Image (spheres, coloured by chain):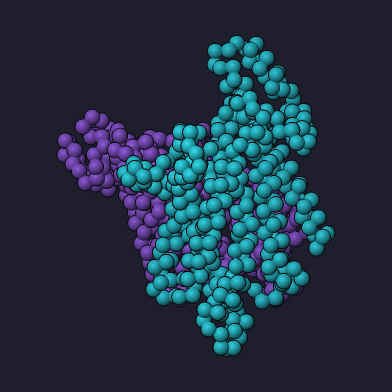
Chain colours: A cyan, B purple
């Protein structure tokens, strides 16, 4: 187990290194020069060259890569070209907003999705069919379009909820509960959008998994023992059906960092997704690279975590026994 | 196969999915017959922002209203279907081809080749897709062909993993072993005996993937990195309606509803296919 883990950790590191390397050279290939954006279109060639020299962009690419990698692994993420601020500070500032939004929406969509999927698999018939119509529609909704529709309904028509940012302009003057209320009102629309588009997928997954488990021998035994349908469904079907859901949850870990790019740009949410979109637009190399490295690392860690969690809840995986699937 | 298709046609999900998709294809193909010109603007002042079901001063009827340039929303929707459906289908064809190729090779030659290809798959899965999409879209002029390439190149990993698993499982089956024992060569075993049996989950994934690809195309066009106006695609139609949500909500609503309908149809068709063709696979695909 420990050896397998070490091996996975090593390949994971290799994957992250590969991703970071590819992205480093890919963004240099893209047209656009951050130095030009800094000095402006009217600058002379000498000014541009001086700017490039001070950013270290005049060095050969492999050398730039090596020095970036050494500094990055030592924890020095560099300075943003576009804003002049520490990259680590920019990301540290944006991350809580993303975690708040994406974390809450993941939590809500998993809880709601598991409940809806369990109701569907447990009841069948007309209830199942009508809920299926709902979940497949939610599954098919593009997030940015749903966001626009909610803005149209709740901001422009009902004039009830704000559509931009994480706090109002007067947030600094609010105290106590009114400040919390202001935050919650700003959170409402993006959170609803993200949760709604997430619920459909989870519910469909849970329903399918429960229907699969229902055919397993241990469920027939539980029924034969005379357990009530509710007990069979919850103790013997749902618990086993949640094993693949745990994997799904592990795979959505990276979303906590970069998952809500479209939604963040619709609602002007000050999170990591928006920092990334702006950084790509401005060719802000240090910011793009730091964000890439963190999100690639999270993908690897999420995969590993999903496997560990699955091994923890499913003894068959832990012992390497591949029995009844 | 006839039995399977008969029972598929009796499935209500499949009926709905097929009807909607066929309708969308007909509208896309027959757009010049069913709708006016999607780009030309005759007279902005009198024809802009007409609500749905209205007739303008020139006597032209606008079932879905007009946008801020006085262009007919229905015409743009019908012509946009060409781009959106075409890009969705082509992107899935590309990603499925890459996925089958890599998955089959890695499953059939589990040694160094397999390890290398599986590593490549893990690597591609760890690439931050949105950043990659943004970068690729800025490397070349945004266009429909670029969107197909970008979606294809960043979307093959699920199929590769799926095919890898299928090929590994099938390779140990007696009929494959007997084919090898009879002296059939490696590539021929793979092409004739293994891959045809591994195709069921691939077809299902492809059906489900078309909806996803259409949605992603719209997302890219929405960010301004996909199909460029004035060529209409459902994504850039939604984007263009974003600024007029207050005085002309129908501009963004119509393409969104069309998009949701087609994606629901593709998903339901995929579900029905999966249940008919291979009930055991139900859990593998979301």
Q: Whole-percent x and y of residue B154?
A: 59, 47
Q: Whole-percent x and y of residue B144?
A: 47, 41
Q: Nearer the viewer, residue A157 or B126?
A: A157
Please tell me whether residue B124 is drawn above or below residue A107 in the rendered image: above
Q: Nearer the viewer, residue B101 or A1?
A: A1
Q: Is residue A143 left or right of residue A2?
A: left
Q: Is residue A143 something that shows in the picture?
A: no
Count of marks placed on residues: 0
Q: Quadrant of the C terminus of chain B?
A: bottom right
Residue at (80, 63) in percent of width and height: A1
Q: Is residue B237 left or right of residue A171?
A: left
Q: Is residue A215 left or right of residue A163?
A: right
Please tell me whether residue B30 is drawn above or below residue A64 in the rendered image: below
Residue at (59, 17) in percent of width and height: A39
Q: Whole-percent x and y of residue B240?
A: 38, 37
Q: Quadrant of residue B237?
A: top left
Q: Nearer the viewer, residue B158 or B48?
A: B48
Q: Whole-percent x and y of residue A281?
A: 55, 31
Residue at (80, 55) in percent of width and height: A7
Q: Quadrant of residue A17?
A: top right
Residue at (53, 83) in percent of width and height: A228
Please tell me whether residue B61 is drawn above or below residue A229 in the rendered image: above
Q: Is residue B111 something that shows in the picture?
A: yes
Residue at the right extreme?
A3
Q: Quadrant of residue A129?
A: bottom left
């Amino acid at each position: 187990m420990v050896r397998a883990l070490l091996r996975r950790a090593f390949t994971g590191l290799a994957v992250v290194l590969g991703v970071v390397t590819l992205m480093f050279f890919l963004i240099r290939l893209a047209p656009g020069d951050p130095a030009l954006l800094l000095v402006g279109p009217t600058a002379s060639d000498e000014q541009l060259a001086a700017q490039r020299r001070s950013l270290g962009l005049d060095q050969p690419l492999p050398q730039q890569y090596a020095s970036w990698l050494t500094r990055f692994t030592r924890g020095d993420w560099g300075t943003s070209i576009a804003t002049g601020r520490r990259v680590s500070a920019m990301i540290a500032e944006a991350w809580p907003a993303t975690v708040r939004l994406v974390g809450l929406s993941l939590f809500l969509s998993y809880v709601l999705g598991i409940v809806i999927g369990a109701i569907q698999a447990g009841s069948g018939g007309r209830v199942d069919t009508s809920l299926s119509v709902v979940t497949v529609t939610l599954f098919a909704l593009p997030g940015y379009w749903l966001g626009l529709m909610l803005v149209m309904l709740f901001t422009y028509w009902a004039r009830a909820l704000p559509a931009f940012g994480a706090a109002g302009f007067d947030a600094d003057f609010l105290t106590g509960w009114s400040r919390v209320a202001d935050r919650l009102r700003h959170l409402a629309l993006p959170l609803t959008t993200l949760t709604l588009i997430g619920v459909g997928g989870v519910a469909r997954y849970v329903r399918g998994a429960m229907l699969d488990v229902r055919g397993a021998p241990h469920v027939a035994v539980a029924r034969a023992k005379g357990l009530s349908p509710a007990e069979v469904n919850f103790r013997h079907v749902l618990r086993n059906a949640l094993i693949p859901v745990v994997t799904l949850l592990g795979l959505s870990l990276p979303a906590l960092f970069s998952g809500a790019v479209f939604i963040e740009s619709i609602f002007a949410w000050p999170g990591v997704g928006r920092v990334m979109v702006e950084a790509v637009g401005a060719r802000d190399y240090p910011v793009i690279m730091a964000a890439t490295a963190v999100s690639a690392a999270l993908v690897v860690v999420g995969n590993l975590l999903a496997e560990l969690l699955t091994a923890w809840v499913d003894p068959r995986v832990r012992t390497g026994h591949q029995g009844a699937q | 196969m006839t039995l399977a298709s008969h029972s598929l046609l009796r499935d209500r999900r499949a009926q709905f999915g097929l009807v909607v998709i066929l309708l969308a294809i007909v509208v896309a193909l027959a757009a010049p017959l069913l709708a006016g010109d999607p780009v030309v603007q005759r007279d902005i002042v009198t024809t802009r922002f007409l609500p749905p079901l209205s007739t303008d001063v020139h006597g032209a009827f606008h079932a879905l209203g007009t946008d801020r340039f006085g262009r007919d929303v229905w015409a743009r929707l019908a012509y946009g279907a060409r781009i959106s459906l075409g890009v969705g289908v082509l992107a899935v064809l590309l990603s499925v081809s890459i996925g089958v190729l890599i998955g089959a090779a890695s499953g059939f030659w589990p040694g160094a080749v397999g390890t290398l290809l599986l590593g490549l798959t893990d690597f591609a899965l760890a690439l931050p897709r949105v950043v990659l999409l943004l970068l690729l879209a800025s490397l070349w002029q945004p266009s429909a062909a670029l969107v197909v390439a970008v979606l294809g190149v960043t979307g093959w990993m699920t199929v590769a993993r799926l095919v890898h698993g299928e090929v590994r499982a099938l390779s140990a089956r007696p009929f494959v072993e007997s084919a090898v024992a009879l002296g059939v060569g490696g590539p021929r075993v793979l092409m004739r005996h293994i891959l045809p049996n591994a195709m069921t989950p691939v077809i299902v994934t492809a059906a489900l993937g078309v909806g996803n690809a259409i949605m992603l195309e719209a997302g890219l066009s929405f960010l301004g990195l996909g199909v460029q106006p004035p060529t209409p695609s459902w994504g850039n139609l939604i984007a263009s309606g974003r600024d007029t949500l207050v005085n002309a909500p129908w501009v963004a609503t119509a393409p969104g509803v069309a998009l949701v309908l087609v994606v629901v149809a593709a998903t339901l068709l995929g579900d029905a296919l999966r249940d008919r063709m291979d009930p055991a696979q139900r859990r593998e695909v979301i």
